[in-house]
Amino acid sequence: LYSGNEDDVTERLDKGLLDFGILIQPADLSKYNYINIPAKDVWGVIMRKDSPLAFKDTIQAVDLLNVPLICSRQAIKQTFSKNEFADWFGEDFDKLNIVTTYNLAYNAAIMVEEGVGYAIALDKIVNTSSDSNLCFRPMEPRLESGLNIVWKKHQVFSAAADMFLKEIQAKFSNSLSDI
């Protein structure tokens, strides 16, 4: 089991160090076979519970224009034909005050807790429970990202990996890419 962003996971897939990966959209799937996972992840803002924005139920683009932001490096990449994250901000994307980026949300949560800024992240990826100093507020309009289980095209699997693939194909049979 390995946790990382798109670049980390695809590098390990390409080198044969991983059989499968889970990628959060937007991601370049052109080199891989994949299965769409039906669930969607919701984007929002991780902030300290004592933050002025913590009193809002949802966060709009205008709320984020004058605050220091900590953004996912993968999400702000503009190398895709359609970047839903950049599209959500529209013309205001270039006006954002992005003070740093992160690969792992755990690191972003530490920076938020230390007062560096507000992290744009997926829900349920860091601890925002009642015993945490952090909270999550969803973006409005709602922004969701799909998930894909990916593997190299023409991959020769071990018996265990092949069995795993057959199980996930059966589980998500309505969500298969062209294999």
Image (cartoon, rainbow, N blue to C red):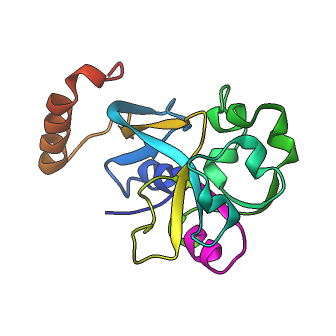
* 115 part of magenta stretch: yes
Q: Is 164 on the left or on the right of 54, as rendered?
A: left
Residue segment shown in magenta: 108-120
Q: Quadrant of the N terminus?
A: bottom left
Residue 143 locus on image (x, y percent): 56, 36
Front-most of residues 50 and 66: 50
* 4 part of magenta stretch: no
Q: Is 95 on the left or on the right of 4, as rendered?
A: right
Residue placed at 30% from the left, 24% from the top? 175
Q: Quadrant of the C terminus?
A: top left
Q: Write down the quadrant of residue 40 in the picture.
A: top left
Q: Is 50 on the left or on the right of 127, as rendered?
A: right
Q: Write down the quadrant of residue 93 in the picture.
A: top right
Front-most of residues 170 and 99: 99
Residue 9 locus on image (x, y percent): 46, 53
Residue placed at 69% from the left, 64% from the top? 52
Q: Is 140 on the left or on the right of 168, as rendered?
A: right
Q: Is residue 154 visible?
A: no
Q: Give above or below for 122 relative to 4.
A: above
Front-most of residues 114 and 178: 114
Residue that sits furthest to the bottom in the current view: 114
Residue placed at 38% from the left, 58% from the top? 17
